[in-house]
Image (cartoon, rainbow, N blue to C red):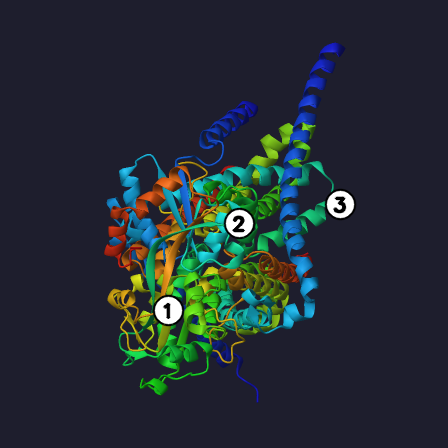
Amino acid sequence: MRINPRAEQAFVRAVLWTLTAITVLILVYIIVFVLRKGIPALSWDFLTKNPVDMGKGGGIFSTIVATIVLTAGAILIAAPLGVGTAIYLTEYTWEGPVTRIIRFGAECLAGIPSIIFGLFGFILFVTKLRFGWSILSGSLTLAFMILPTIIRTSEEAIKSVPPVYRTVSFSLGGTKWQTVTRVVVPSALPGIVTGVILSVGRSIGETAAVIFTAGSALRLPTSIFSSSRTMSVHFYILAREGISMPNAYGTAAVLIIAILAINLLTYYLMNRFIKKYS
Amino acid sequence: MDGTAKKRSGTRLERNDRLVRLALLVVAFSAVSVLLVITVFIVGQGTPIMFRYGLKSFLTGTRWYPSENLFGLWPMIVGSLYVTVGAMVLGVPFGLSCAIVLTEFSSKRLRSIIKPVIELLAGIPSVVYGFMGVVILVPFIRETFGGPGLSVLAAAIILGIMILPTIISISVDALQAVPPTYREGSIALGATKWQTVKMVLLPAARSGIIASIILGMGRAIGETMAVIMIAGNAAKVPGSLLDPVRTLTSNIALEMGYAAGEHRQALFATGVILFIIIMVLNTVANVTASRMKGAKK
Amino acid sequence: MTRQRFACLFLALAVALLAGCRGGRSKNELTLAGSTSIQPFADKWAEVFMERHPGFAVNVQGGGSSAGIQACKSGACEIGMASRELKADEADLTKIVVARDGLAIIVHPSNPVRGLKVAEVKQIFSGDLAGWQAFGGPDKRITVVTREEGSGTRGAFQELVMGKTRIFSGAITEDSNGTVREIVAHDPAAIGFISLGLVNSQVRALALDGAAANDANILNGSYRLVRPFLFVSRGLPTGLAKEFIDFVLSDEGQTLVREEGLLPIR
């Protein structure tokens, strides 16, 4: 029996659109649900006071600070290392078995579950190196976790710079270093920045690796050896133990808004750079 | 041309260049050694026990009671498998449909609204997804289907939702990478849009779509926090969709804090197994993705 | 010019790192880690202690009793918190009893079952009895909720209720008292065990062998599920750790204990 192609298309279109609508609705519903329940809990006090009574009262200031410090620490360690490695691998070495192994290794490590990094960080930093549960342990673990991704995305970005840019620079008398810093890296910057910002997003949302390395202490951190609780960890604990649903939603709302803001920043920066360089 | 002046400036630039090259070498070396340390550490800690305990009993043993030195991973392996397969069964049809609709059946304006929304959702922390599962999905399953609600079904649904952004964005890229001439040729021959999609575009984008599915699988296998919150974590092979389940990653997270000696090594060994699974998935994804790039040329 | 910028960045980084680095952990910081049963109470003690002694920081982590003992042994924290007795291979640590706590068997408030024999609880948790009907409850399968193996609460439960019998592998496993309470509070067919001090209006503690779960019955011995809350340390506690423990053992610390629902040591 031959099915009328137009009828078939109409039917399939209906099915596809239904599935798509369901998908989009579910995804939007999640954001709306959290924001609707969470925004009422937000207030100036919520954002500037520390948690009280295991998080039942007070605000989430210490967790905001911890999140910022931990993520900043991770980026400060991983970004220079990652971008530098990418530059070296693409500009200063040739495409051989060694670089291919490194690339494969970085790709695999980028896909490893974060709990493994947590296990690694816990055993190495918290226990063996005696750093204890601390911002130091947490930042180092997060840095190790995002390093492979930054290497990979930076490499892709640098490789996609047209070779003609380099040739022109050399023909104008530039040295390798001048070419790299003034021609290659600036044109690869959108891709590099995207990779870094994606890693920032990942670090902010990371819970498993952080709980076991930075710990879950509620106090405002006083040094890099202090333990501290990030927003994701705080949300996890509040939600799981039912300590305070309003505060849990509030924390989740802050998290989502922060990540939304970071993603919007990415779009804005990328668009600006594309306009600038095209 | 003043010979001496040129020589002086030439040497200075060369020296800077060499310094920079050295600095970058040090940086690259440190980064690579970090990657090496992680790999060596995990493999080094995990492999001895696999052979000492016996690889077969480690992988197929059904009893996980660390206090009695029983390390049978089978329930968790099956758990990870069920939950991942469930996530794919749910995530792939919805994700692919979304990708097809986005690239072929929607206007540019609609696309410019939906695509960013999906990419934004990729950044939502997994604990938020897990929380939604606890608050909405688990009670629903318990009241409608029975059982504790903390179940394979709950984990599969939540994971399926979590991998949607991955599948959608990579499949969209794969579909958009198909040359417009394919579409034009097919329409010129009188095919409907759907016939074009079904018989021309999907086969052409097959490699990329498969890569997206495999990467989605990787994400599902690696997810820890959301699963711990909604799967129940019973170290027993689930008998039905409504039974609680424990995955390999949850196993590590639940026991990491206090595991010592052999127990700790058993957890690292679990990490090694996850490592191997990810490596295999990555290789397959790479091979299929490069075939996609090759087809583009 | 870029080189100067890099140099500045490097310098700033170095300064920031050095500023944070006080040569290892500060003497003004104390870390407690371990039992999730003790954690909320330790947090309360820490709050009051820090009000009395500004300039000192007391961090409280969870992780479970065994994790806390491990952490103390390895030096990751100064004081470990354990809600069970120490095992043979942990006996080299100094232990100080800071409170006592009952172990409550909890069910959903709507559950008609009000009390069980300890032997029946054992049957439920070993998987031998699967339905509430056997105890006069609704015709539903029992959702058994337990803690992870390293939990002191589970350790105490194992010792006081299960004996040599294993908790069955199909039991739902969670990693803190709070989570167990949440699950039991929302599932009418669930049963679990938590610290008596953490029982609230969302769950009901069963009477065991006829004795209701309250402090009076613990004191007179009719409710037998009691375990000590221990602070452990390597060697005798010194410095800030000693001050904190002294505070917890003082009248004020113990009054706080009683207010929060625990049993003081005396």
- Looking at the image, tell me whether mark 2 or mark 3 is earlier in sequence order: 3
- The one nearer the camera, B211 or B32, is B32
- Letter of the chain that mark 2 sits on in the rendering: A
Marks 1 and 2, Cα distance to the nearest angstrom? Answer: 29 Å
Q: Which quadrant does the N terminus of chain C fall into? A: top right
Q: Is residue B196 above or below residue B147?
A: above
Q: Which residue is mark 1?
A: C193
- Letter of the chain that mark 1 sits on in the rendering: C
What residue appears at the point 60 percent right and 67 percent down from the top-left corner?
A: B71
Q: Amino acid at mark 2?
A: Phe
Q: Secondary structure at mark 3?
A: loop
Classify mark 2: residues with Cα within 10 Å, few (<14), some (14-19) or many (20+): many
What residue appears at the point 33 percent right and 79 percent down from the top-left corner?
A: C116
Left or right: C242 as drawn, with respect to A56: right
Q: Amino acid at mark 1?
A: Phe
Q: Secondary structure at mark 1?
A: strand
The spot of residue B99 in percent (x, y) is 50, 65
What residue appears at the point 59 percent right and 47 percent down from the top-left corner?
A: A148
**Residue B274 occupies quadrant:** bottom right
Q: Are marks 1 and 2 on the same chain?
A: no
Q: Amino acid at mark 3?
A: Gly
Q: Which residue is mark 2?
A: A122
